[in-house]
Each structure stands twice: as C-alpha cells, then as structure tokens.
Image (cartoon, grey):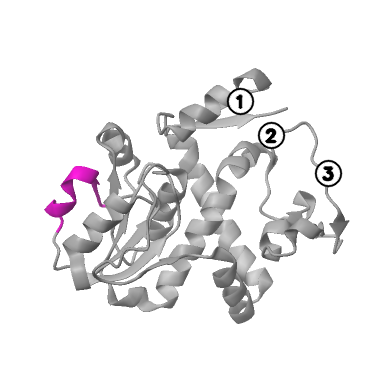
Amino acid sequence: MPMATHFKISAGKVSPISFSDVSSYRDDLSPFYASFERVSKNPFYQPKNEDFEILVRGLYTTAWLIDDFMFDNQYFDAKQYIITSASSKTSIALAFAIQERGERPAIGITSKANKAFVESLQCYQQVISYDDVESLDANIPSIIVDMAGSQTVLSSIHHHFGEQLRYSCRVGLTHHDDIVTEERLPGAKPLLFFAPTQLKKRIIECGTAETMKKMGTSLLSYIEFCRSIMTIEHTVDKTKIDAIYQNVLSGKADASIGLIISL
C-alpha cells in the first residue's frame, strides 16, 4: 500500500472472490497488479500469517513464477542457478522455491557483510561474496537470476561464464547506484522477467484453481520457513518512515528483520 492513512480506488470487476482497481492510471498495467483478493474467500489465508503475507507474499509469488518458468523451459539446459543479492527477500524466496522443487542447486552471491546470514538460511547450496565470482566453475552451464541490477556484478558473471551462461534473468534493482546498461555481454542476453506473463500461461494450462492451490500451498511452507529466519518489527510512527526508507535504500537494513509501518 502507499505510505498514507487512506488509499482511494475505483472498484470494478467485483465478485465474491475479488475486485479490481479500474482507475484510468492503471490502464497500461497488467490486471495482475490491480486485483484485490477477499481474504475470506482464500482457503490459504490465516490471520496469524498476516505480517508475513504483507512482507513476502508478493515477492514469493514472483520467485515461485521464476522457478516455474525455468522448469517450464527445462532450465535452458543449465545445471545450476546463480542468484545475486542473495540476502534480499525475493532472492531468499527463489532459493526456497528452487530447493523445494529439488532439481537444481542455487548459488547465492551477496556482500561480505551479509554472507554469514545468507549461509545460515541453508537454502543455498553455496554462498560467495561479489569479490569471489571467479572462484566458481565457469564450465558449468548456468542460469543467472539478477536481483542486484548492477552493471558491474552482471558483467563480471557474464564474462566469467561466457557461453555457459544459458539464461540471464533480470528481476531486481537492489544496487540502484550501478544500474545495468545496454552493453552487449557474453552469453545469453539479459532479459527482464515479467511475472504476469508466466502466471497467465500457467493458468491457461492448469486452470486458476490448480495454479492458486500450488502457489498457496508453497507460500504456506515458505511462511513457516520465514518464521525461523525473520523477526517482525512494527511501527506506527510516521516520523520514522524516512529513516527506515533511507536505511533500506542504502543497503544497510538488517536482512533478518521484516519492517511493517502502519499509519
């Protein structure tokens, strides 16, 4: 939700299960981003999970769909995942989904400061710092899922693996001070991942009910995992918003803490 006391929408497409914001400024967005679900009709909703639903549901949905997309494409013949910004919540969610499927290992790349935390999660098969990319075996066909969005990091991985980099999936932008450019890189061309496209494909092939069942069941497992790795901190003090935001923006926020601001 926006950082405000109220959020006004134009409700349309109303059903017992959901409704949508049909405001004109959403016209160019996927309907996926304008839909609001009635939790009373969601068989996977549990009030005790609400804090974690707020923090990780959207991110886990993206992560689950990335793993589903790679599985759908036989992993582009790659043998392992390489995930940047490994301490970010979307990266952790992806590593969990990959481990849950159990078909490919995931290597997490993170800062030296966060390396011990990421290792403690035990959902990556290996964790290295950004300085150690060249220690990886460049002969193993790999997929990179780039949550960092850093030109320096992406370039170093592409140049190290070369043609053995079978798919380059751009997702996040945690390193916003070193944004990826259009430079031609060795190996697969970096492509942005658009979650609604894979969700639509999965719904067409499996049906809405079955797709939501798979995602909902997996999310519940992930929330239980999150209880063991994440502490929730609440605040209702609007004067703290800027300090909290700047801390997250600078990359200094503790990855083991989930922050919820309620106005």
The label number, if any, that marks residue 3 in the structure image: 2
Location of mark 1 (residue)? 241
Q: Magenta residues?
A: 125-136
Label count reads: 3
Question: Residue 68: x, y in percent?
Answer: 47, 68
Question: Residue 33: x, y in percent?
Answer: 67, 58
Give the Cα separation between the discs numbered 2 and 3: 13 Å
- Determine the secondary structure under disc 3: loop
The first of marks 3 and 1 along the sequence is 3
Q: Where 258 falls versus 97 (above or below)?
A: above
Give the Cα separation between the discs numbered 3 and 1: 21 Å
Q: Is residue 227 left or right of residue 74?
A: right
Which image quadrant: the N terminus?
top right
> In the orientation shown, which residue stands out farthest toward the bottom?
205
Location of mark 3 (residue)? 8
- Tell me what residue is drawn at x 53 percent, y 51 percent: 59
Q: Is residue 148 left or right of residue 194?
A: left
Question: Residue 156: x, y in percent?
Answer: 22, 55
Near mark 1 (Cα within 10 A), the count class, few <14, some 14-19 or many ≥20, is: some
